[in-house]
Structures are given as structure tokens and as C-alpha cells.
Amino acid sequence: MNTIAAPQGTVSNNTHADNFKAIDAVETLLAHLVRIEAVARVACEAADELRSPSGRSAKRELMRMQIFVGQAAHEAVEAVTQADRLMSDLNGQRRPRAEREPGAKRTRARSNQG
């Protein structure tokens, strides 16, 4: 089984409201979600490798377990994808307005002329 390194936290222990940085919080959340995704994928692979039991009831339970583990892995992938989008959005907001909106400088220049 693969060993997964624990994510390093990036949010300060200083809990004052003026210390909160959304990008740091999302980055920490993303690191934890990536770890959860990795664990879910390993669990899914392990569940798929289990031998099929001989009893009808046991087979049904194994199938249910495989479905739930597969669903958890899928949900983890979706969560990581969403967190990646949030990181991209937040990183986009950190750039100067002119870089985010190519027409921003021109609009401002026109409004200053009139």
C-alpha cells in the first residue's frame, strides 16, 4: 500500500480576524482534500481487489461496499477539482485589475479624457 505524506498546514495559529487570508485557507483545505482523495482511491482499489464471497448476502454487501467506496472516491475527486477552481479564482483576484480585465486600463483612460 502507498504511503501518503501528511499535508503541511499553511494557516497561522494567530486567529485574529485581520490575519485571515482566504487563499491560505483554501490552500490548506486543498491539501487536506488531496490527501482524502488519495486515501479514497487506495480504498477503492483495495475494495475492487477483494475476492467475491460465495454467499448471496455477502456478495450483495461486498457490492454495496464497493459502490460506497467508489462514490467516496468520486466525491473526493470532485472536491479537489472544486478547490482547484477556487484557488485559481483567488489567484486571479490577487493579480492587478489591469491583468484580470484587459480593457480596464483603456476604460479608465477614456473616462479621464472626457
Image: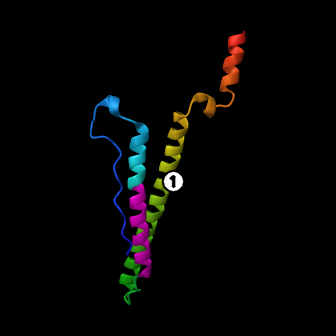
Which residues are drawn in magenta? 33-49
Query: Three-letter amino acid code at disc 1?
Result: Thr
Q: Is residue 64 visible?
A: no
Magenta segment's dominant SS is helix
In the image, residue 76 lies in the stretch drawn in magenta: no
Q: Of residues 82 and 111, which is closer to you in this image? A: 111
Q: Is residue 23 left or right of residue 92?
A: left
Residue drawn where x is 43% and y is 61% of the image: 37
User: Does residue 60 show up?
Assistant: yes
Q: Position of residue 34 (x, y in %)?
A: 43, 58
Callout count: 1
Residue at screen point 40% across, 53% down: 31
Q: Secondary structure at mark 1?
A: helix
Q: Residues within 10 Å of mark 1 (few under 14, many from 20)?
A: some
Q: Is residue 22 above or below residue 72?
A: above
Judging by the rendered image, the residue that carries numbered circle 1 is 81
Q: Is residue 48 magenta?
A: yes
Q: Nearer the viewer, residue 65 or 39?
A: 39
Residue found 38% across the figure and 87% down from its top: 53
Q: Nearer the viewer, residue 47 or 90?
A: 90
Res. 58 image quadrant = bottom left
